Image (spheres, grey):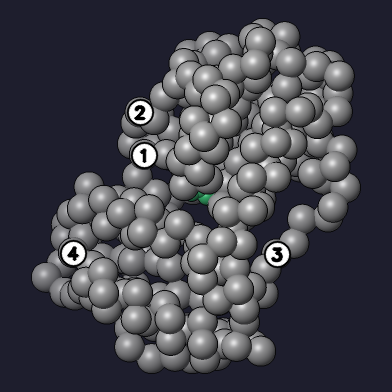
């Protein structure tokens, strides 16, 4: 079992995965990416991730050279060569390698991937919930594209970490959009609320799973934005992403606890079902 990389047709060790200096992902962040979590050899919600990848690439006018079948086959080979049953796959597609110039070059796009063992959450994180920091959302207006450009997200996350928080919850025009690398939800009077899937958020794949589970369990799933005061007055709140699955929010830094300050029943029920789905074939 080993971490492994892939670059344009070659499987390579991570140490060997060196990019040419004129790779446009490196020079400009000119590309998109995906993150897949592999459970017992199978990427969870693979088709939904591939839909988002091809859509994101299309929106920035990058043509991904392998088609979906070829891409699935490359991913399968990466997983089997690594021998990792449970792994994290990052995949990047960039506009390729060409002498630096802002305008698009006429070169093929470039595809890289890595697989590594799961980055595990400490069990206490989900059992106790986390603190979040409210932070201005300083991103561009195309947050629905899973772009390689993550600078505002990194700055927000770092601010949160420096305050001892797990995540930065971003606020734009008085409304919570999402986390720096997660979607954000509150629970009030038995209903889940989250920002609508507009250009102001990344439509998370875990968010799709949460919506399906809520529908299955008869829990209203409202795509209505909420502000920080509503978050603070919520019964529960939580974050989701493919990497963390679901993590309850216990409190907001400097503002107080949410609900009981402990993970609530809705977050627990949704996560229990999410975990079950990751085990289903
Ligand atoms: C800004 C942002 N929002 C939401 C998410 C959650 O997306 P997903 O559930 O597809 O992992 C991520 C994940 O990286 C993210 O970076």
Disc 2 crowd, CA 10 A, few/some/many (<14, 14-19, 20+): few
Q: Where is mark 4, residue-wise? A: 63
Q: Nearer the viewer, residue 102 or 96?
A: 96
CA separation in Å, label 3 and label 1: 25 Å
Q: Which of marks 3 and 4 is in front?
A: 3
Q: Where is mark 1, residue-wise? A: 144
Q: Is mark 2 on a helix, strand or loop?
A: loop
Q: Where is residue 191 in the image (x, y as percent from the top left)?
A: 59, 17
- Picture residue at 88% right of the left edge, 47% below the top: 124
Q: Nearer the viewer, residue 125 or 221?
A: 221
Q: Earlier in the sequence, mark 3 or mark 4?
A: 4
Q: What element carries label 1?
A: loop
Q: Do the residues labelled 1 and 2 touch (CB within 8 Å)?
A: yes
- Picture residue at 70% right of the left edge, 36% below the top: 269
Q: Are marks 2 and 3 in contact (CB under 8 Å)?
A: no
Q: Where is mark 3, residue-wise? A: 119
């Amino acid at each position: 079992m080993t971490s492994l990389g892939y670059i344009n047709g070659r499987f390579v060790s991570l140490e060997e995965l060196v990019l040419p200096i004129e790779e446009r992902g490196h020079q400009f962040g000119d590309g998109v990416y995906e993150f897949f979590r592999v459970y017992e050899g199978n990427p969870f919600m693979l088709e939904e991730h591939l839909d988002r990848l091809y859509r994101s690439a299309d929106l920035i006018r990058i043509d991904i050279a392998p088609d979906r079948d070829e891409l699935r086959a490359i991913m399968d080979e990466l997983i089997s060569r690594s021998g990792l049953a449970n792994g994290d796959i990052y995949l990047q597609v960039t506009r390729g390698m060409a002498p630096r110039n802002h305008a698009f070059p006429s070169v093929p796009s470039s595809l890289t991937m890595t697989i590594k063992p799961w980055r595990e959450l400490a069990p206490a994180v989900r059992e106790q919930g986390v603190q979040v920091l409210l932070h201005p959302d300083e991103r561009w207006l195309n947050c629905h594209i899973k772009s390689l450009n993550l600078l505002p997200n990194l700055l927000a996350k770092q601010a949160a970490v420096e305050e001892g928080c797990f995540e930065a919850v971003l606020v734009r025009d008085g409304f919570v959009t999402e986390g720096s690398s997660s979607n954000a939800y509150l629970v009030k009077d038995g209903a889940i609320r989250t920002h609508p899937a507009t250009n102001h958020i990344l439509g998370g794949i875990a968010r799709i799973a949460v919506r399906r589970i809520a529908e299955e369990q008869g829990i209203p799933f409202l795509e209505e934005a909420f502000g920080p005061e509503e978050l603070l007055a919520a019964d529960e709140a939580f974050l989701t992403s493919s990497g963390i699955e679901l993590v309850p929010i216990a409190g907001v830094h400097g503002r107080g606890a949410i609900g009981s300050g402990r993970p609530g029943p809705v977050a627990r029920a949704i996560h229990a079902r999410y975990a079950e789905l990751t085990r289903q074939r």
